[in-house]
Image (spheres, rainbow, N blue to C red):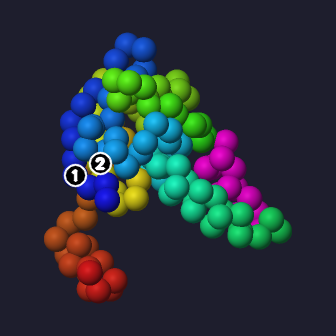
Amino acid sequence: MLIGRHENSIDAKNRVIIPSKFRDELGHKAVLTKGLDDCLILYPMATWRQQEEKLAGLPMSDPSARAFKRFFYANACECEIDKQGRILIPANLKESAKIEKDLITIGMLDRIEIWSKSQYEGDDKGGKLNADDFSSFAEHYQV
């Protein structure tokens, strides 16, 4: 299970150290792609395969389904995790997530989110909910 928050940074060669706590679940290869909230998502290979199965089931006749598939596949890349526990973030993904230097890396059960620290800590980012929204969400989904 991937849980927790870690602060780290990207180096001059666009490499990010994956927190050691997460590396055992990732193994030596993972898939990196754009997230839906101005972040990047790093999928363990097994989780990516499950995601692919779900996407394969979407109807090709639906323009929204095609656009959704395009969003994930066009921005996805396989990442090798090197001996130092680093992955390389391609320039296009770094730019789309507005990553400059400081990062927040979050375990999200079966995937990892990689955020620009400034984006994550901004008022309207990071999936923040005010107390009323949080309570309403928890009640609606019974969590």
In reply to whether residue 82 is colored magenta, the answer given is no
Query: Where's residue 17, x and y in %?
Result: 32, 29
> Image height check: is 73 above or below 103?
below
Query: Where's residue 7, x and y in %?
Result: 21, 36
Going 31% across and 59% down the picture, which residue do you hit? 1
Q: Are marks 2 and 1 in contact (CB under 8 Å)?
A: yes
Query: Where's residue 21, x and y in %?
Result: 25, 44
Going 50% across and 31% down the picture, which residue do you hit? 80
Q: Is residue 18 left or right of residue 28?
A: left
Q: Nearer the viewer, residue 92 or 78?
A: 78
The magenta-colored residue range is 62-74
Question: Circle 2 sits on which residue?
Answer: 106
> Image height check: is 61 above or below 107?
below
In the structure shown, which secondary structural element does the residue marked by tag 1 occupy?
Answer: strand
Question: Circle 1 sits on which residue?
Answer: 4
Q: Which mark is residue 42?
A: none
In what quadrant of the picture does the C terminus appear?
A: bottom left
Please report whichever mark, 2 or 1, sits nearer to the chain's N-terminal start.
Answer: 1
Q: Is residue 72 left or right of residue 19?
A: right
Q: Distance from label 2 to label 1 (Cα)? A: 6 Å
Local crowd size for mark 2, using a 10 Å CA cut-off: few (<14), some (14–19), many (≥20): many
Q: Nearer the viewer, residue 68 or 58?
A: 58
Residue at the far right in the pictured view: 61
| Res. 104 in view | no
Q: Main secondary structure of the magenta part?
A: helix
Q: Amino acid at mark 1?
A: Gly
